[in-house]
Amino acid sequence: VASDQHSCGGVNWPLFGNISISDVTMETPYTEAANKITDDIDVCDVAGIFEKLKQCDFEMFEPKGYGDVKTLFHDDVIEAISKVANIAADIMTSQTPNAIVISGCGTSGRVAFLTARSLNKIVPGEKFRYTIAGGDKALFTSQEAPEDNRKAGVNDLIKSTIDDVKVLYIGITCGLSAPYVAGQLDYCMDNLDKFVPVIIGFNPVYLARKNPIYDWDKTFYDVVTRLERLTSQRKGFLINPVLGGEAITGSSRMKGGSITMVILQTIFTHALNGVLTSSDMTSQLECKNLLKSYQNTCRLFYESSTTTVTTLMTSATQSLKSNSSVYYVSSGGSGVLGIVDSTECIPTYGASLDDVRGFIVGGYGEFNNAEGDIGSLGKNYQIGCDDLSKLLKLRDLEHNDTILVVAKSWDDPVLNEIQVEKGKKKLKLSASQSNVYVVVIDTEQGKREKNMPDYVAKLFVISIDLNEELLSENLIEICSKWIFNAVSTGAHVLIGKVFRNYMVDLKVSNQKLFHRSIGIIQRFCPSVSEQEAMTYLLKSIHDVTNVDDVMHRSIKDHVLRATPKDKVLTTYCLSAVLRCSTSPKQARM
Ligand code: F1P
């Protein structure tokens, strides 16, 4: 961890790892800062991209923080995790109607769902709930406008806890920014007799978002500083280690999503281990050891997956380049993670709904979301292997799809889907125009192989030798996330969706992304003021050459107008750089 300080506005801002000095200012949170490691990721080959993603992910486990920059292994972070595990254990074992609600927007809400889903399978009483901005539709497609709706957050929380006496609320917002979560957190703090509020995010409190929240007199910063005051009385908890910049600036689906999983799984594994019987010290030590298992797994994963991931990245790139698709197929939590990964490609890279899609063995029967089968809403809500089989039948020979099957062991049911049974292929993944790859994440020592049908282009085995029996399912699951993240990120970088390490084709679909877009324009045109950058953005959003008539509108209005549009940022980012007077329509063409 770098120990330099960057002086800005009379304040010394601590630097973390590989974030550039110029990127951490009073306004730039760590989650939105560019990472030096990936500064030139856009000109790297597959091996270079893999190496950079690896180095970025290793930063998640920096051994210790300094000053007020706390990293994952900082004592305060571990103490908070262990305290929350104690409360969780209480709720999990109580007979009264108590609940644990995990909530967030986008990837954070999907990880909330994944966690609640898997814990309800092992803890009796359906005590785990999730809320996600935009409801269950947001599990499959990005619904970012509801993220800015703090009232919707409160209503969802009230609805899901109406019959409960005591609730552990865990709100997740990587950037400490989402209004949906801010509303819920504030509501919890107004009702401390019922709620114990916890926030997971990856910025120090002073970098929480200070922009006004629509229709409210509070900002995220106001709400989280209120929570900070409660932490000394142990009436609320803040778990906010800094992770270093994302590989693709602001792409919190990556490190942010992974460490959210790590923290939640550590809390609940520890709670299940009978934390109530251990002393504070023992409890913290156990949490630290659990965190170390993830660190170890991350290292083992990257050490043993270079060939696998680079081959998959290459195939996915060729598919996207030739207007074909990348399909992920997995079972259980890995199936969910494939869907989560694909969902985020749309707002992050301006990808189409068909570019990357995820499928889960057993479809909705396995997925287990609160609203049940919503497949009738459209093809992007159809998630079963049968749906994929049907889809493949319709693909013509011009397609060059990549099908990536990830198995968590040799006994994973996903392997039954593709095996040859008495000469018959069970799952019709065998479209001749597809490149089918199978990856088995193997924790066993002995070599075990199954016959693969001839249509499987390559079988990869990633060997991870785990001593951590208890956690092994979780550890393998997170490896599947790293595979999906690397494949989709690498492929989008290689087809030119990233400039330096900025997502220049993002969708301007919520307040956070509106501000991120202004930041990107300024990043490439340092001489442009914030106001000027916003003017360029508004010209692009509203297709006007003069912004006088649109300037007074709310950010909410701008976002509503921008959400369905493509290439909003590339259009005006370009114009700003060239200082040209092209009309917005011309530039987009
Ligand atoms: C929530 C989120 C991200 C997504 C995009 C828009 O962010 O939906 O998951 O990738 O950046 O915002 P956060 O509240 O967890 O910071």
Image: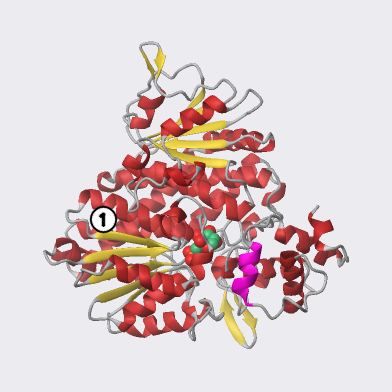
Residue at 75% x, 65% y is 540
The residue furthest left is 95
Q: Quadrant of residue 273?
A: bottom left
Q: Is residue 243 visible?
A: no
Q: How many marks?
A: 1
Q: Quadrant of residue 263?
A: bottom left
The answer to which of 338 and 448 lies nearer the viewer is: 338
The residue furthest front is 376
Q: Is mark 1 within 8 Å of ligand 1?
A: no
- Colouring chosen for the image of the structure: secondary structure
The location of residue 369, given as percent across then percent down, is: 34, 50
Write down the residue under mark 1. Answer: 269
The residue furthest bottom is 10
Which secondary structure, mark 1? Answer: helix
Residue 244 inside the magenta-drawn segment: no
Region rendered in magenta: 554-562
The location of residue 514, given as percent across then percent down, is: 63, 68
Q: Is residue 334 visible?
A: yes
In the displayed structure, 166 sits above or below 265; it is below
The residue furthest top is 423
In the displayed structure, 423 sits above or below 136; it is above
Residue at 49% x, 54% y is 58
Q: Quadrant of residue 553?
A: bottom right
The location of residue 474, given as percent across then percent down, is: 33, 47
The location of residue 573, given as percent across then percent down, is: 76, 63
Residue at 38% x, 64% y is 103
Q: Amino acid at mark 1?
A: Thr
Residue 559 inside the magenta-drawn segment: yes
Graded by Cα atoms within 10 Å as few (under 14), some (14 to 19) or many (20 or more), the crowding at tag 1 reads many
Instruction: Name the chief secondary structure element in magenta.
Output: helix
The answer to which of 525 and 360 lies nearer the viewer is: 360
